[in-house]
Amino acid sequence: MVSGRKVLVIGDGLGGVSFANKLRLKANDTHIKVIGNSPRHYYKADGLQIPFHLKNYRNSIKNIRFLLHESIEYQRDDVVRINSGQKTVALSSGSTEYYDYLVIATGARFAPEDIPGYDGEAKHFYDLQHSMELQLILEKFQGGTIVVTVPDSPYQCPPAPYQFAILADEYFKKKGIREKVTLTFLSPFKTLFPLEDISGRIETLFIDHGIGFKTGFKTTSVSQKNREVISEDGNHENYGLLVMVPPHKGQPYVVDSALPNEFGFVTVDKYTLQVEDTPGVFAIGDAANLKTVKAGSATMRQAETVSDIIAKELGSDYPVRQYDGGASCLIYTGNNKGAHIITSYSGETSMSKPDRLGFYLKRIDSDLYFSSLVRGMS
């Protein structure tokens, strides 16, 4: 094993933490340092359930140091710029970090400014604060039209907004006011769900739950005055409550580094996750420009691949498992049932038959996440 090498990880979300822990298991005498500035590590998947009182947010957060192996160095700081030519990362504290290997796990940032009228009007559940705000809004909602929609660009966990609509149907039934609530889903895609192989299955679920939907509706602006969303081709849809996933982009310092694509996501080799034409630099998770689902399961598989590659270069005998584009999403399908959606670079997508086991796993997945997955034991 080659000693004295430094592996720098920027980002303290799932990608950064799980990668660091995985590499520690394979290269135990390597200096691993994580740079991030999250006051707490939040399990994002719970954001879907918190608005409906299905999860207590206190069980969805942990201290970063509690999750990282004790030998991994952690520094709370913000990245200002990546200079891959000099193998340095500039930090907001004024210091500069040098590295032999760099793993970019900075996730995605929200870009509500890309949809005029979005800010202050649309609601979402993609971070803890907004999820808890939406919980309060749903508690007070007494009737009207709820429009759920997504951007026409990559975003985290594609099935989540569809699950939100199903959970909303059941939530208002329990409150006894479902007949006062109209649920409408506006899809920017030519099919309801972006994965065409299973879109028909999602349509059936929506019909069973009384959820209306339109396809090809690409929202370009929100009229707060008229309370309507406006599509690219000029169509309008009124709402009483608008739940819209904000557009996602790469982090600003990654955009400034001359590494990313048009959305600020870093261009990588789809099998090795190495940044294009930049040896020793990798990007994983939502930070990477991959034509696969932006999901936690995909991030963990990518972390596995990169930890294999770096450990191998440092002298370990671990076999390298290239990333195959695999992702597995556990989704709630209603009536206390859940199903798995599985996809990969092969282009074949499958969805299992909904059952009670899928529902149970969905309810306890945060326990599994904190106890093993984010710790690199998967």
Image: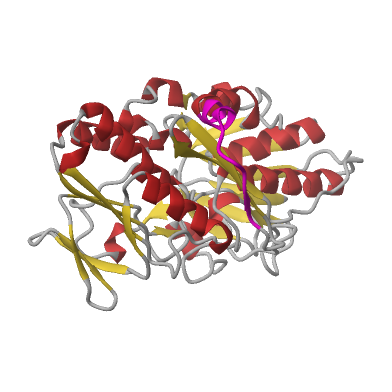
Q: Quick check: is 44 in the magenta stretch? A: no
State which quarter of the image contains the N terminus: top right
Above or below — where is 207 with respect to 63?
Answer: below
For the image, the number of numbered tags is: 0
Q: Quick check: is 360 in the magenta stretch? A: yes
Residue 259 in picture, x, y percent from top left: 57, 66
Q: Is residue 346 left or right of residue 253?
A: right
State which quarter of the image contains the C terminus: top right
Q: Nearer the viewer, residue 375 or 103?
A: 375
The residue at the far right in this view is 317
Can residue 122 be seen from the camera position used here? Answer: yes
Residue 303 in picture, x, y percent from top left: 68, 44
- Please name the colour scheme applied to the rendered image: secondary structure
Residue 281 in picture, x, y percent from top left: 68, 57
Q: Is residue 176 left or right of residue 39?
A: left
Name the residue at 38% across, 51% down.
207
Name the residue at 36% across, 37% down.
167
Name the residue at 66% across, 51% down.
102
The residue at the far bottom in this view is 233
Residue 279 in picture, x, y percent from top left: 74, 62
Q: Nearer the viewer, residue 369 or 272?
A: 369
Q: Nearer the viewer, residue 300 or 134?
A: 134
Q: Is residue 117 left or right of residue 100?
A: left
Stretch of the chain drawn in magenta: 349-362
Q: Nearer the viewer, residue 123 or 26?
A: 123
Name the residue at 79% across, 53% down.
322
